[in-house]
Structure formats: C-alpha cells, structure tokens
Image (spheres, rainbow, N blue to C red):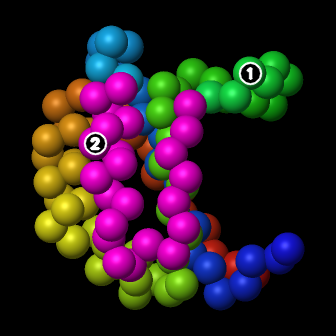
Amino acid sequence: MLLKNTFVHHVHFWLKDKADKQKLIDGLNTLIPIEHIQDIHIGVPADTNRDVIDRSYDVSLLLLFDTNEAQAAYQIDPTHVLFADNYAKPLCSKVVVQDSVNV
C-alpha cells in the first residue's frame, strides 16, 4: 500500500550505556497516547546483515503523521517534551532524526 499525505518522522537513538535500553523503550512507550501520532513503531535493529544496513543504533522510533502541522504539534506536546528531557537527553549519546514527506 502506498502511503499518501504522510509525514514520516524516523528517529535513531544511540545509548550512553547499553544497560539503559529498556528504560529508553519504556520512555518511548509514553509517547503512544499523543493524539497527533497516526502510527508508531518502536524497534531495535533487526538481525539483517548487508553492507547497506546500519545496525549501530540501539533503538528506533518511527512515527507517521497526517500533516506537517501534526508533526509540529507533536514536537511541543508536553508528553514529548518530558520524554526528551527525562529519557532521550540523559540516556543517549547521539540521536539522529530523518523526516520525509511524499513526493
């Protein structure tokens, strides 16, 4: 199925301490009730090994939004702000965000 009119927000997290993986995942789960999110996927690297696959991250978050405005509202949602302050910033050494829209 081709997704149309979708804003994709994909975030990869690298932990300072690998022992904090479940804590970060628990924090990501707090984002689920945010009303602006159309779909959410919280994951870890799959056991796939090809030259083009980057498996160096620890946890990923894939969010789908109906519009750029919904994504912008998510960014300032208090639940997201608390997640960033209480989980992402203290636990992660690196965070990479890739946003995309339909062509």
The image's mark for residue 38 is none
- Image location (x, y in percent) of residue 54: 67, 28
Q: Does 37 lie within the magenta span?
A: yes
Q: Is label 1 in contact with label 2 (beta carbons under 8 Å)?
A: no
Tag 1: Cα neighbours inside 10 Å, few (<14), some, or many (≥20)?
few
Q: Quadrant of the N terminus?
A: bottom right
Please tell me whether mark 2 sits on a helix, a strand or a loop: helix
Q: Is residue 61 above or below residue 103?
A: above
Identify the mark nearer the N-term, 1 or 2.
Answer: 2
Residue range corresponding to the magenta coloring: 22-44
Residue at 22% over, 49% down: 84
Which amino acid lies under the numbered mark 2 shown in the image of this protein?
Gly
The residue to which callout 1 is attached is: 47
Residue at 83% over, 76% down: 2
Q: Does 100 lie within the magenta span?
A: no
The image's mark for residue 27 is 2
- Image location (x, y in percent) of residue 60: 51, 41
Q: Quadrant of the C terminus?
A: bottom right
